[in-house]
Image (spheres, grey):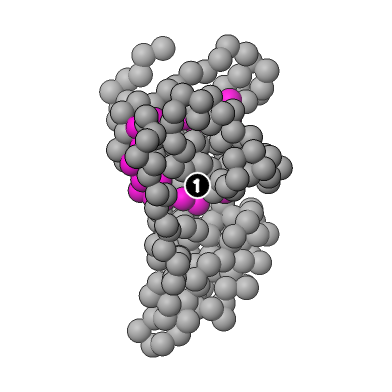
Amino acid sequence: ALLSHSQLLRRMAELQRGVPVGAFAVPAQHAFAFRSELRNIGWLKAANSVTPFAPSTDAGGVALRAVHLSQKGAAAMEAESVGEMPPTVSALVEDGTAWYVPGLRVRSLACLVGAQPKPVDRDPTARFTFSELFAGIGGFRLALDKLGGQSVFASEHEPEASQVYEAAFGAAPHGDITEVEANEIGPHDLLTAGFPCQPFSSLGDKQGLSDSRGTLYLRSCVCCMIAVQRHSYWRMLPT
């Protein structure tokens, strides 16, 4: 079905924003309480939920941490559902002790205090460069390496798949793509993305964007728009 004008504008906004993501900036002494209360309501990111936050101290010299939210929590904050915040979180946000930072990721520069991402050395003999999102065990890379390409970035969330990838290619992929800033991926000629198809497949529940996995293709779109490249390959196999 064709989208209405308002639906099209909303979808374009979704593409620009990508997967809901964000974190609370909190004094270090409150980070544990934040993490516990957010976990109880499903708002806490499953892994790497607390990171440093720059500036590492506020104006009063208090050490700061970033407590990262799950997609559910970030989506609620984007919808301004502040009434759903737990008591401790709500109280500290209301008095200005803590605040929400939309778009803040685990690998945002503000959370990489003292650690800067290292760019990949480019091979001058490579015919082209490529980046792999949702890389799995490296099926795309296996083919593209044989065609003379050079992988400059790879991301895979599942630990077992990452171990197989590292054993095959000698380098571990980055983890969760929602934790990586799109401009950290860097320039490349070709982008591949094996994002989850279950939400759209006839073998799945067909929840589409209502399934958190279904929103992950938006992350691929954002990376596609920001990174300098020549080609992206999109194909949804009939299932």
Q: Secondary structure at mark 1?
A: helix
Answer above or below: position of 24 versus 199.
Answer: below
- Which of 214 and 166 lies nearest the eye of the viewer? 166
- Residue 51: percent from left, percent from top: 53, 67
Residue found at the very far front of the displayed protein:
125
What residue range appears in magenta? 175-197
Label total for image: 1
Q: Is residue 156 magenta-colored?
A: no
- Answer with the quarter of the image where residue 165 lies: top right
- Answer with the quarter of the image where residue 170 lies: top right
Q: Is residue 183 magenta-colored?
A: yes
Residue drawn at 50 percent across, 37 percent down: 133
- Which of 220 and 68 lies nearest the eye of the viewer? 220
- Answer with the quarter of the image where residue 198 lies: top right
Residue drawn at 56 percent across, 66 percent down: 50
Residue found at the very far right of the displayed protein:
160
Residue drawn at 54 percent across, 56 percent down: 69
Answer above or below: position of 114 versus 151.
Answer: below
In the picture, measured across the screen, residue 49 lies left or right of residue 228, that is right
- Which of 62 and 233 lies nearest the eye of the viewer? 233
- Residue 112: percent from left, percent from top: 45, 65
Amino acid type at mark 1 = Thr
Answer above or below: position of 159 versus 82.
Answer: above
Q: Is residue 209 visible?
A: no
- Residue 237: percent from left, percent from top: 56, 15
Residue neighbourhood size for the residue with mark 1, other residues' Cα within 10 Å, grouped as few (<14), some (14–19), many (≥20): many
In the picture, measured across the screen, residue 60 lies left or right of residue 192, that is left
Mark 1 highlights which residue?
Answer: 178
The quadrant in which the N terminus is found is top left
Residue drawn at 46 percent across, 24 percent down: 147
Answer above or below: position of 87 versus 147.
Answer: below
The quadrant in which the C terminus is found is top right
